[in-house]
Structure formats: structure tokens, C-alpha cells
Amino acid sequence: MNSLLVTSTDEGTGKTAVALALARLAADRGATVGYMKPKGTRLQSNVGKTLDADPMLARELLGLDAEMHEMEPVVYSPTFIAGAIRGEEDTAALRERVQDAYAGLAEGKDTMVVEGAGDPATGATVDLTDADIAALLESHAVLVARYEEPGDVDRILTAADDLGDRCLGVVFNAVSSAAYDEVETDVVPFLESRDIPVLGVLPWERSMAGVSVADLTNELGAESLTDADTGALVERVLVGAMSGESALSHFRRTKDAAVITGGDRADVQAAALDAPGINCLVLTGGHRPSGAILGEAEEQGMPVLTVQTDTITTIERIESLIHGGRVRDEATVERMQELLHSHADVDALLD
């Protein structure tokens, strides 16, 4: 049986899309395929009452009938981590739970796709990092990475070193046209000189970019202040640091954007509500807007989110999510299948 762990260097790399696309490509080749995400991390509740969205999506897109507690044996919530730090979790028992769940899911399967966490170090408190899981389940691993600047190579080298001989190589995802030549000319030869094969360089595609307001809310740990629909996509970030009049002119020249501003900038918030291309308003520093702004937002159906982080941190986090995107539907996975087929060594990944 081929057991493949799909891990990543950081959040927002497109790991889930790659994992599900590889699973479907294996199925297209006639293999019986299973899926598992040992650590549930994309949770809507910090006590883990809501399961990770990725296994639920995998079960739907791959036509699996496995139980969620098998596909996601460890709900890695903040509450769980705090308990582990206090010594309330039995590491050996957790590892056995993961192994038992995997054995059940893998029975009768030709290929098992195991999805790692957004950060390969997640799980260290209970000896279940992605590298630990690869060794525990005797899986090979592919590392999904972004490339925006040379410093990104440091994370790749560290993650690959942790995986050791189990690392099959790296797949770069969503590489911009500006960085593509640099990756092919400089980065690929460098990594391969360090015995880290590069198995794919996938170009950035607008159709794969963006993140829904719902996913943005969950990933930021934001509080939603309106009862608006959160299905709209955010493809860019605008910072409301100018006057209200200047902001309105600026906002009206864009579309599918999130405006980030402080809770005390009523003029900027009003401008965002008046601009048809703004799909979401994000207020930083834990501030709340006035009742008038919230009332207008409710009337217009505009999502208004508040986060505890500062503006710079919030911008960086949202841009990371937008760049990596989120798997939204079957079409997203199908497009990733096409990208892998055209720009990656699928044989090396699946055989």
C-alpha cells in the first residue's frame, strides 16, 4: 500500500487542495483510496466541539463512508493543548489511537492520503508533529510550500530535515509569474543539491485564489458582529488608513475586497459600506463599531468582523490565506488535479 503524508511549511499553502487532488488522481488510476487527518486543527470552537472542516470535505469529495472520529482521531484544540501541557493527556495512548484509526481506514485500500497540519510542528506537545506521524504510520511525505522570497527556503530545509528519508520532495504551489523563473533557475537546483527533490512547481491561478468570508472568520478567530451571509470571496485586502472621502474613492475602484481598519474609524467604515466591491469589514484591536454602523451593515448584509490582533498582523494573516486559498468545492479540487498533472511528477508522488 502507498501511504502518503501531505504536509506543508506554513498555513495557506494549498495543502488540502493538493491532498484531495492527489487522492482523486490515485482513484482515477484505479486505486482504492482512503483519507485521514490525524490532528483536527481547523476548529470553530476552542473546545473542539466542531470538527475539522477538511476531513468533512474529504469524505464528501472522495465518497468515503468512514466515521469522523476515525478520520480525525485527535481534536487538536487550544483546550486540548492546555490539557496536554498540564499532563492530562497520555502521549502513548494518543499515538496508539492514531495508529488504530489509521489501520481501520487503510484496510483494503491501495493508497492512503494522510493530511498534516498547517504548521509541521503542530502536535509537538504530544509527540505528534507531522514528522512524528510520518514515522508512526510509515508514510512517505510530500512537502507543499509557497515561494515569495529567498527566506522561504529556510522553512523548506527545516521541514525536510525533520522528515528525513521519508521526504519524497517538495511541491511549490501558487508560484507567481514574477517568482516563477527564480524558482526554476535558482531554488530548484539549490534544493536538489541538498538532496531534496522538487516534484512540482504549480503556477498561481486567480481561479484558485481567494478565501470565503466564512473561512476568513474561522481562520482569524474573529467575532462576527452581523448576521450577514459569509459565502462571498475575498481576493484582496484594503487598509482604511486615509480619510473617509479618499477611502470611498479608493474602495470603489476595487472588488471582492476586505477592508481592514480600526473600530474608531466610522468614516472609513461608512465608506466601505458604500462601496459595492467590498465584501467584508475587519476591525482590528478588538474594537467594535458604533450602533449606527452595525445597523447599516445589517441592512446591507455586510459581514463585520472584529479581531484582537493589530492591523499589520491581521493584514499578513489575511494575505497568507488569500494567497493559499481554501478548497471551496469540487471544481477547486478538479483544477488542482489538472495543475498537478501538468506541472508535477504525479508518478513519483503516487507510485
Image (tube, grey):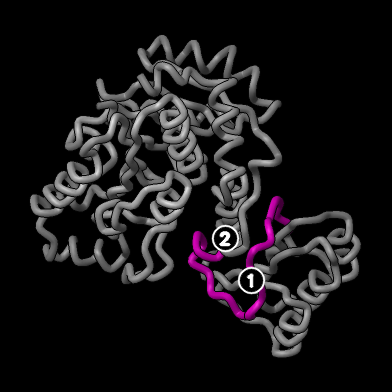
Name which of mark 1 and mark 2 comes first in the sequence.
Answer: 2
Mark 2 highlights which residue?
A: 216
Give the residue type that dot 2 points to.
Leu
- Write the residue at 63% across / 80% down: 227
- Write the residue at 53% across / 69% down: 222
Residue in front for this viewpoint, 317 or 69: 69
| Residue 186 higher or lower than 95, as above or below | above
Q: Quadrant of the N terminus?
A: top left
Image x and y of residue 245, in percent: 90, 69
Mark 1 highlights which residue?
A: 283
Q: What stretch is highlighted in magenta?
A: 216-238
Q: What element carries label 2?
A: helix
- Determine crowd level at label 1: few under 14, some 14-19, many 20+ residues with C-alpha closer than 10 A: many
Left or right: 113 as drawn, with respect to 299: left
| Residue 35 higher or lower than 41, as above or below | above
Q: How many labels does the image show?
A: 2
Q: Is mark 1 on a helix, strand or loop?
A: strand
Image x and y of residue 173, in percent: 55, 32
Q: Quadrant of the C terminus?
A: top left
Residue 79: give its label: none
Left or right: 131 as drawn, with respect to 201: left
Residues at marks 1 and 2, CA–CA distance in whole angstroms: 13 Å
Q: In which quarter of the image is residue 177?
A: top right
Q: Does the magenta stretch include residue 273?
A: no
Left or right: 72 as drawn, with respect to 9: left
Image x and y of residue 293, in percent: 74, 83
Give the residue type that dot 1 points to.
Leu
Q: Is residue 230 magenta?
A: yes
- Write the residue at 40% across / 27% down: 30
